[in-house]
Amino acid sequence: MIPGLAEILLFQGLGELVSHLFAPAIPGPVIGLVLLLAFLCIRRGVDSDLAGVAAAFSRHLGLLFVPAAVGVVLLLPELRAAWLAIAAALITSVVLTIGVTGLLLHGLAGDAGKGD
Amino acid sequence: MTNVAQIWVYLSGSPLLALALTLWAYRIALLISARLGGHPLANPVALAVAFVALAITALGMPYAKYFEGAQFVHFLLGTATVSLAVPIYQGLAALRGKIAALGIALVAGGVTSIASAVAVARLLHADRLIIGGLYAKSLTTPIAMGVAERIGASPSLTAAYAVTTGVLGAVLGRFVLNGVGCRAWWQRGFAIGVAAHGIGTSRAFAVHPEAGAYASLAMGMHGVLGAVLLPWLIGNA
């Protein structure tokens, strides 16, 4: 677990560095993600330790955004005032996004690879 | 009585209380979600957020104080974001022969997600704060919060929208996809991943492994593309 975590922290650090120096608009971790992806493509494989750490993170990703998400309680008055606009925006957006993406894929590729 | 007060002063000054509260809230939320068969409406993050919010209100603990302690968990978000490179890499093989269709669908889906959310919110006279959180809400939550910080939106609000969007996508996706006649598992999965990131992806995995793989790929691609393009788009808007 330690080698994998050390590797990820290294790429996170590199990402922060690149973000600071060249691309302040892009979050450092996202640049770190792209750099790690490039590294994996060059090395042609994920070692099992790194894969284990990544799997642990993705299994419990939800836990990590609890502290920040709790901050929404500070915005409750604003949310209460605008709840209809928010609900309408979120529902419309998710329905249209799934519809447009699904329709386009269906139109471009047909039923190729249709499941069981 | 003084002893209890002293212990309380000590606890509320150390990260222990906030960390324990976060972990236990999440643990109980996971148990409840599992008990309800993992239904998307019983989302463990939403439940955990509600539990922590209730607990800190009951304890009279200011949010800033809670966050000061819980920031150790929060810090790992960046690390978890970097580790998303692994599932994306493992999904790259699935792109073969489909990259053009997936690329077009991803861009169209991403634009639809932002444009429709912002248009509806504006139409209903929502203010800047409320609308600001909508831009990044279809990205995977850790990336969405990072982007929100860069574009001057509230990361907390963005996280709340992102979780809600994920739940809505996981619940409504099936009906929308049936409605537009999209039947292939890879297409269904990809559409859910673009719109509803991680929560949609875990729903897709529960339905069919191929749908899950493409949903996870869509979530990763959308996250990276959104993080690169959103600050630029908003800077030029």
Image (tube, grey):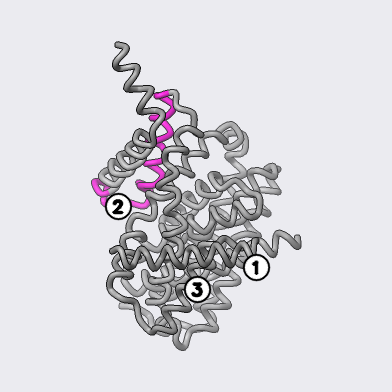
Give above or below for B94 relative to B193. below
Horizontal placement of A82 versus B11: left or right? right
Q: Amino acid at mark 2?
A: Gly
- CA neighbours of label 3 inside 10 A, class few (<14), some (14 to 19), many (20+): some
**Residue at which label 1 appears:** A22
Which circle marks residue B38 in the picture? 2
As helix, strand or loop, the secondary structure at mark 1 comes to loop
Q: Is residue B131 visible?
A: yes
Magenta region includes residue A18: no
Highlighted magenta segment, given as a residue range: B34-59
**Residue at which label 3 appears:** A35
Q: Is residue A98 visible?
A: no
Q: Amino acid at mark 3?
A: Leu
**Position of residue B155 measured from the top left corner of the image (x, y, whole percent):** 56, 48
Q: Residue at x 40, y 83 (%)?
A: A43
Judged by its main secondary structure, the magenta piece is: helix
Q: CA distance from mark 2 to mark 3?
A: 34 Å
Decide which of tag 1 and tag 3 comes sooner along the chain. 1
Between label 1 and label 2, give the one nearer the viewer: 1
